[in-house]
Amino acid sequence: MSEPDYKILSVIGDSIANGYFDLKNTGWVGRTIQKLQNDKNYGFYARNFAVSGDRITDCLQRFRSQVVSNPGDCLIVECGVNDIARWDSRDSEHSLSLSFRLECWDALLTEAKRIFSKIYVLQILPVNEQKRFIRDNDYELAWFYRNDDISEYNGHLKELCLKYSCDFVTYDDALKFVDWNSCLFDDVHPNEKGHELIAQRMYEVLKKDFIDDQ
């Protein structure tokens, strides 16, 4: 009997990968699968290990504890904005230091390369710094996100992808034609329009790699 002809996408990340604030309750992961299924019935499925609030250190541990036993055909990592949250003020320290972030990314990508031939790291999308919801953590400190932090971090992620021969998935061209702030539910989470933009880009990338190039 021949092997079933389908691909499984393993996803680790935060609330954005978990689909928060998509009115269709599918998020960009579910939307991407739907688009791929339209091209190939029963051809694609997702194992979504994303958890709200996860940072790169959490993704590393989730990879080690969950993904390695259910690896699938490719790994998609959507993570980073929680790493650079600033608590209490816009100028306080990042949630995680740069050196520790890069150490965790190095460990994750080194271990992932032993299992996956295809790894996708998603660009961190901009936030709306003028539209900050009051969110408090257990220490009753407000969280702040800054686009200059995001831009710098994306530069490091791009370098890591080059180092480990991973795909760095960007949206820069698509963002030229949309008002991204209208695609946000709050300051950081995409709404249904935002999830659709991410899904369309991931569909284009995965279709090329798993449908067109086969």
Image: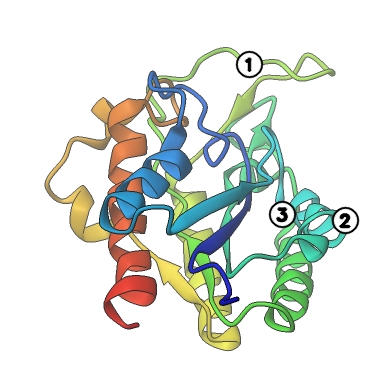
Q: Earlier in the sequence, mark 2 or mark 3?
A: 3
Quarter of the picture holding the C terminus: bottom left
Instruction: Please name the residue that numbered disc 2 is placed on.
Output: 65
Tell me whether circle 1 and circle 3 mark residues in contact (CB < 8 Å).
Answer: no
Label 1 element class? loop
Q: CA distance from mark 2 to mark 3?
A: 14 Å
Name the disc covering residue 56, or none.
3
Tell whether 19 sits left or right of 31: right
Question: How packed is label 1: few (under 14 Cα within 10 Å), some, or many (20 or more)?
Answer: few
Q: CA distance from mark 1 to mark 3?
A: 21 Å
Tell me whether circle 1 and circle 2 mark residues in contact (CB < 8 Å).
Answer: no
Question: Hey, what amino acid is under mark 2?
Answer: Ser
Question: Hey, what amino acid is under mark 3?
Answer: Ile
Quarter of the picture holding the N terminus: bottom right
- Judge whether 200 appears above or below 211 on screen: above
| Residue sitting at x 71%, y 74% | 112
Q: Earlier in the sequence, mark 1 or mark 3?
A: 3
User: Which corner quadrant of the image does residue 23 belong to?
Assistant: top left
Tell me whether circle 2 and circle 3 mark residues in contact (CB < 8 Å).
Answer: no
Q: Position of residue 93 (x, y in %)?
A: 71, 43
Instruction: Please name the residue that numbered disc 1 is placed on.
Output: 135
Q: Earlier in the sequence, mark 1 or mark 2?
A: 2
| Residue sitting at x 33%, y 27% | 192
- Judge whether 103 appears above or below 30 on screen: below
Label 3 element class? helix
Colour basis: rainbow
Disc nearest the viewer among 1 and 3: 3
